[in-house]
Image (tube, grey):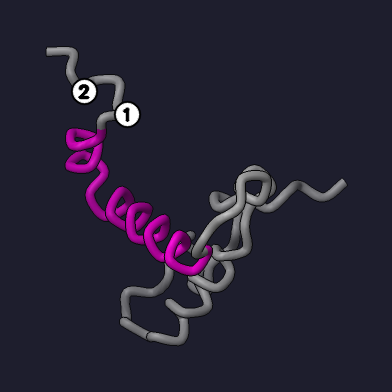
Amino acid sequence: MTEPRTHENTPQPDGTGRAPASGEQHSEELREAERAQLLPEEDVVGSDDPQAQAAEILHDSDARTDDPEGTLEESVQSPEHGHD
């Protein structure tokens, strides 16, 4: 049985889970096009603009990958947020 595709297990061109930082526009467009294919749970509710949604999701994911400590501090979803 094939595991369903999720954002976390979608292979990327450089094998790291992220598009190369070389700024290749084609790679970024391909990455966004692949992510714009809605996941089953996203497909249930639909999307007005899957391409824009994909771009934002990938932007947020890249920020969390590039600065995990900083984005953890900023996240309202982090367990440490608001528990001073």
Q: In this view of the protein, which residue sits in the foreground, 32 or 19?
A: 32
Residue carrying label 1: 77
User: Is disc 1 surrounded by few (<14), some (14 to 19) or many (20+) residues within 10 Å?
Assistant: few
**From which residue to which does the magenta span run?**
50-75
In the depicted structure, whether residue 27 falls above or below residue 46? below
Placement of the C terminus among the 4 image quadrants: top left
Give the quadrant of residue 71. Answer: top left
> Magenta span has 52?
yes
SS state under label 1: loop
Q: In this view of the protein, which residue sits in the foreground, 7 or 20?
A: 7
Q: Main secondary structure of the magenta part?
A: helix
In the depicted structure, whether residue 4 falls above or below residue 16? above
Give the quadrant of residue 41. Answer: top right
Which residue corresponds to the image point at 39% horizontal and 74% vertical from the top-left? Answer: 20
SS state under label 2: loop
Q: In this view of the protein, which residue sits in the foreground, 18 or 83?
A: 83
- 2 relative to 65 in the view: left or right: right
Which residue corresponds to the image point at 62% horizontal and 57% vertical from the top-left? Answer: 38
- Report the disc number at residue 81: 2
Which residue corresponds to the image point at 88% horizontal and 46% vertical from the top-left? Answer: 1
